[in-house]
Image (tube, coloured by chain):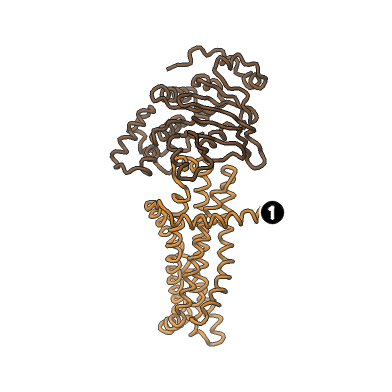
Chain colours: A brown, B orange
Amino acid sequence: MIEFRNVHFAYDEKEVLRGINLQIDYGETVVIMGPSGSGKSTILRLLLGLECPQKGDVIIDQQDICNLPEKDKREIRKNIGMVFQNGALFDSLSVGENVGYYLFEHTRMTLDEISEKVEKMLGFVGLDSDEIIDSLPEQLSGGMQRRVAIGRALLSTDPKIMLYDEPTTGLDPQSGANILSLIKKLHLERNICSIMVTHQIADALQVGDRFVVIVEGLVVFDGSLDELRESQELDVLNFLAPFRESLHGVTNKRFI
Amino acid sequence: MWLKHMAYHSQNQFFFFFRMLRALFRLPFYATETKEQLYLLGVKSLFLVILTGVFAGMGFSLAFAQELSEFGAKNYLGRIMSISIVRELGPVLTGLMVAARVSAGITAEIGSMKASDQLDAMIAFGIDPMQKIVVPRLIALVIMLPALTVVMDVIAIFGGWAVATLAENVSSSLYWASVRERLTFGNMFIGLLKPFCFSFIIATVSCYKGFTSEGGTKGVGRATTESVVLSSIMILVVNFFLAKIVFQLIKGYL
């Protein structure tokens, strides 16, 4: 279980999170929404232990990630797969090396075993491995890069938690839809807990079971889609106002 | 304000240096990366160093020969060449050339990795960038900078010889005899200690600037410039104090 207890966080002078309380169970698909600069991505960085809160605790499986030595942090990170905004693929390595990165670094598998796994994984995320395995990330389209990034995160350690930072931002609708169906497939097939951060409401509604809205560093809404539709909270209404149509248009969110 | 900024960064750079030293003696050790860096930082700088060495040696030799001939002391050309090149010119020129070529590259590489979240991705995969990125570059510099300095010394002395014999009518055997006279243990020790220290300067400054670069591509550009300027200045400053201190310490052995 993941828990945020009264988390405050600031970059230098700028306060980003102002007392976040959140509990997420394994198996849930949570979408964290909010306007740009509301501190959504920071939540993911705190979860990975890349940053530590100035006040409050981030607890993963009863352990406060910031008070752990580096070695134990690494153990916790093994359960977490992170898909960074824009993929963050290692641009000097080929697609195959990117996807197999964790296996190259942390296991004693032979090259053949790794490349077999990499090919299987590329297939799983819907890419033609023969075509792209040797190309560099920059030669791929944005959507393909994002899928390689998901593959890389999945092949790392068989994660229990997947974190997605704006997975569909900057992609064309078709690629965006593919990524969303992949996230959904992962949840259904492997029962992975997904936490997705986005400001694209239409995408968020298709994937999430539970929605969290953050405005100016505070959780202003936490609940299901139906509750979100009914919510009369002023901040939520303001945030959702431009998306009213898509909010009520979604009838069948399990679209694969 | 800028004084505070400078003090803050100097202090952080100092801590970074110690973290780097600690990482040097810790596992895991990335042999493939180190080999790659040895090639990229060392072998690829060879041509630059040779070119610099030839022309610096020739230029020095020409200037000294003309000056010495006024006193009828051209025969001492070799002594002056070997002392100035082995103790000063070789280490400093190699340090500056490698700093210009390498520290820009290292800072830009680490800076853009940071800008595109690749460093965070690396940490998320349980890999310490200090071990994976900094240590291989440090080891490569520590090995390659003294080696390149030796190459520079040799080439520059040969360049000096070419000018001395061909243009200035100094006899070849006299030149070499007087070069050998000043190739003492003390001079060579200082001449090799300097690049060893410079390699730590270049590694610390360039990696630190890369890791702390902020503000996207523009920030990376700024960090790169700062990295080259700072490492070059520090090389010159440290060069002076090192010569002064070490000279005092080993005076008796010279």
Q: Tell me what residue is drawn at x 46 percent, y 22 percent.
A: A177
* Of the pair B5 and A219, the residue shown nearer to us: A219
Q: Residues within 10 Å of mark 1 (few under 14, many from 20)?
A: few
Q: Tell me what residue is drawn at x 38 percent, y 34 percent.
A: A155
Q: Tell me what residue is drawn at x 58 percent, y 50 percent.
A: B223
Q: Amino acid at mark 1?
A: Trp
Identify the residue at the far front of this view. A62
Q: Looking at the picture, how far across and down is residue A164, in whole percent? A: 49, 30
Left or right, A216 with respect to A181, comes to: right
Q: Tell me what residue is drawn at x 50 percent, y 70 percent.
A: B56
Q: Is residue B213 above or below residue A225?
A: below
Q: Looking at the picture, how far across and down is residue A216, in whole percent? A: 65, 30
* Of the pair A16 and B211, the residue shown nearer to us: A16
Q: Looking at the picture, how far across and down is residue A183, in whole percent? A: 44, 25
Q: Helix, strand, or loop for circle 1?
A: helix
Q: Looking at the picture, how far across and down is residue B215, in whole percent? A: 60, 43
Q: Is residue A214 above or below residue B245?
A: above
Circle 1 residue: B2
Q: Is residue A78 above or below residue B24?
A: above
